[in-house]
Image (cartoon, rainbow, N blue to C red):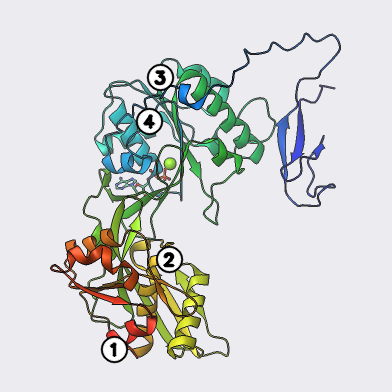
Amino acid sequence: MAKATTQYVCGACGYTSPRWLGKCPACEKFNTFAEELLPAPVTAKSAPKPRFASSKAVPLSAVEREKLTRVPSGIAEFDNVLGGGIVPASLVLIGGDPGVGKSTLLTQIAANLAKDHNVLYVSAEESCAQVKLRCERLQVTGEKLLLLNETCLENIAENIGENKFVVIDSIQAVYTEELNSTAGSVGQVRECATRLMRLAKSRGVTFFIIGHVTKEGALAGPKVLEHVMDTVLYFEGEGQENFKILRAVKNRFGSVQEVGVFEMTESGVRGMSDYSALFLSDSRGEAAGSAVTPSETGNRCMMVELQSLVAKTAYGLPRRMSLGVDYNKLIVLLAVLEKRCGVPFFNADVYCNAMGGMKLSEPSVDLAVCAALASGAAGKPVDKYTALFGEVGLTGEVRGVAFADKRVNECVKMGFRRVILPNKNLPLCEKYRNKIELVGISYVGQMLKYLDLK
Ligand SMILES: Nc1ncnc2c1ncn2[C@@H]1O[C@H](COP(=O)(O)OP(=O)(O)O)[C@@H](O)[C@H]1O
Ligand SMILES: [Mg+2]
């Protein structure tokens, strides 16, 4: 019988087994086993392992600064998200739902890069003819663009050659011969990603790796997939909207708050510079239950509209649903409005949504969520030209937030006439007083009174 070369390891506790197990006998967790290569056996006869020259500790001041020369990708929005361009010898993982445009985006970037560099596009999912068809549709040509239809990692490595930029579409379709499990399994994805990382660092190759996401929206595969990457990006777009958002969730060379907004057109994805009005609806100011907040994501600020629908509940237990705003935050803000300001929600179903598929996680959106909810409950619209920002505490106080001046500046730029903000942030924003009306508040109740929502 052939000697086994692989083993199964529990991802949670490290327990090893010669065969796959559903439940780990050591830590009793389910579904944690993944295939791994067996380490080479150590025998008395085996030659001692050659040791690499050991590194010496050096004082911080003696370390020479390495100059990062970033390579522009040809798509400004993409460069922004990466933190100012592509860092050589880095690994960039791009995840997203099927059909969101990952292959399209990377085909365009590969073609742009191929004007000056040697680029290899490894298509493990589509044939070369299909990629060519896409290139024709996108009207891109790359003199130095090589296409490869291959799923075996060993063959891909052989084909890298002199190419300094390699696109792998996708990591879940690639397998290594040394593991028996099928492509896309946890063990395969982990092993392939680790090998690509070694290739990137040892040969100075930049890899753009496409990754699939699971039903829940996380990258399919082991967590180590994200650990070995330098940059992890998510490409997302809600429903039929033809604009997509690229966001960084991990970046060793830039801020993770960056987002890039793209438009999906017949001729490919196009970066949008005028994105701020995207997240506002036309009916703003007419219907009750909507409020606008300047949201700071990375180095840019955009106006986002929050909408709420407050309806009388038909059942004993009221429903709460939230899109784009944290569900728990919604519950807390409803409780604050009810207890501190006397707005009744106990017998109402509440739905809350951030326009355009935006995901708002910063605390500064609290005040606008409260305004949208109270407006929805009162049935009175919030003035079209009023924006709000501020963090709301459990006692109903409105706390100061970061980047207040930048937010006010964006409100001015987008033609708003009034901004309701925390008193704490007023001093920083005084310089805008001649351009926009600044309304400082300390409690949520003051906001409700000012907007006449009670
Ligand atoms: N002939 C076409 N004309 C216009 N848009 C197209 C055409 N073919 C594909 N698309 C768009 O490209 C998207 C598919 O992009 P793709 O890059 O293949 O997605 P992914 O690789 O993320 O699965 C589709 O959702 C569609 O909107
Ligand atoms: Mg694809």
Distance, label 3 to label 4, CA atoms, is 21 Å
Q: How far apart are the two marked residues, 4 and 2, measured between alpha carbons?
A: 48 Å
- The quadrant of the picture occupied by the N terminus is top right
In this figure, which residue is indicated by the disc labeled 1? Answer: 452
Whether pointer 1 and pointer 3 mark residues with C-beta atoms closer than 8 Å, the reply is no
Q: Which of marks 2 and 1 is nearer the N terminus?
A: 2
User: What label does residue 78 carry, if any?
Assistant: none
- Relative to 201, does residue 185 appear above or below in the rendering? below
In the picture, the quarter occupied by the C terminus is: bottom left
Q: In which quarter of the image is residue 18?
A: top right
10 Å crowding of disc 1: few (<14), some (14-19), many (20+): some
Marks 4 and 2 in Cβ contact (< 8 Å): no
Label 4 belongs to which residue?
129
In the picture of the structure, the residue carrying the numbered disc 3 is 163
Which mark's residue is nearer the viewer, 4 or 1? 1
Give whichever of discs 3 and 2 has the lower sequence position.
3
How far across and how far down the image is residue 269, in percent? 29, 45
Read off the residue under disc 2. Answer: 363
What's the residue type where badge 1 is placed? Asp
- The answer to which of 45 and 114 lies nearer the viewer is 45
Distance of mark 3 from mark 2, alpha carbons?
A: 45 Å
Q: Is residue 152 visible?
A: no
Which residue is drawn at the image coordinates 27% and 66% (left, top)? 427
Left or right of residue 10: residue 368: left
Q: Is mark 1 on a helix, strand or loop?
A: loop
Q: Type of residue at label 3?
A: Asn
